[in-house]
Image (cartoon, grey):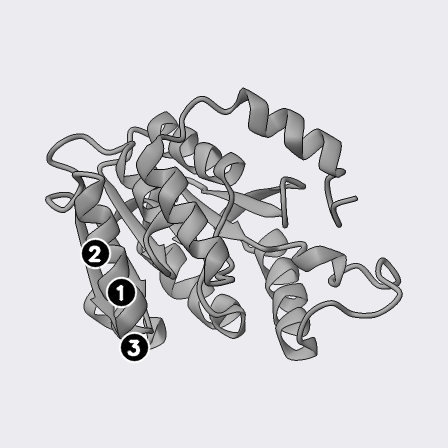
Amino acid sequence: MGQIVPDAVERYLASLNQLADSVLQQVAADGAAQQLPLVDAEVGALLQVLATSVGARRILEIGTAIGYSTIWLARALPDDGTLLSMELDPERAATARRNIDRAGLTARVHVMIGDAQRLIAKVAGPFDLIFQDGSKLLYEPLLDPLVERLRPGGLLITDNVLWDGDVVPGFNREPINNADDTRAIAAYNRHLSTHRALATAIVPLRDGVGISVKRAA
């Protein structure tokens, strides 16, 4: 059984997902072979739907990995839309660029290489949607800078907010993840849920997805 959603329910949801294509399926397979913590197709579809729902023209992503979630998000953009994605690992960034090119999205996507906490100072908003899926230790330090760059009515989406259930005391007999990361996510969740500029709901899909909308000023 899955940690958050039972396997049978996840298989049912996967059977209904008609948005993934051969490029996304291959990128997902490559990620699984490398044991990379990519979002799955159901979260990818959610990202695409949410980006479409806000009419996103500018998207910021923290944590490109090999471009899987990047492709889902970029496909919601118009032809003249822009997605900026930040990745610390140069090799992963290079792979992401190749995958993005295979998906026919190079004109919409720019992958920046480096520490997101430093790169964010070089990026100006407003963005219609921001996807936070990089280092868990940076979730909380990046929160206010990301909110500042989000337009009113825009969405901040955060992956892994339930962290295999480790953020819930007593949920797992033995912790599954690094304790420092777990504490960082728990602190982030508390900050996210009480942030004056945001209204937040957490969806228990896969590893937990936080969906926050920026309130009007």
Left-right relation of 217 to 185: left
Marks 3 and 1 in Cβ contact (< 8 Å): no
Q: In whole angstroms, how far apart are the C-alphas of marks 2 and 3?
A: 21 Å
- Give the x, y percent position of residue 43: 51, 39
Q: Which residue is mark 2?
A: 97
Left-right relation of 53 to 74: right
Give me the residue at 29% from left, 29% from top.
55
Which secondary structure, mark 2? helix
Q: Which residue is mark 3?
A: 118
Marks 1 and 2 in Cβ contact (< 8 Å): yes
Which residue is nearer to you in this view: 50 or 44? 44
Circle 2 residues within 10 Å: few <14, some 14–19, many ≥20 = many
Left-right relation of 12 to 31: right
Which residue is nearer to you in this view: 157 or 7? 7
- Give the x, y percent position of residue 78: 18, 30
Circle 3 residues within 10 Å: few <14, some 14–19, many ≥20 = few
Give me the residue at 43% from left, 38% from top.
47
Residue type, mark 3 in image: Arg
Q: In whole angstroms, how far apart are the C-alphas of marks 1 and 2?
A: 6 Å
**Mark 2 or mark 3: which comes first in sequence?**
2
Q: Which residue is mark 1?
A: 93
Give me the residue at 49% from left, 54% from top.
32
Reply above or below: 125 against 202: below
Residue type, mark 2 in image: Arg
* Discs 2/3, front: 2
Give me the residue at 66% from left, 59% from top.
163
Residue most extreme to the front: 33
Q: In whole angstroms, how far apart are the C-alphas of marks 3 and 1?
A: 17 Å
The quadrant where residue 183 appears = bottom right
Which secondary structure, mark 1? helix
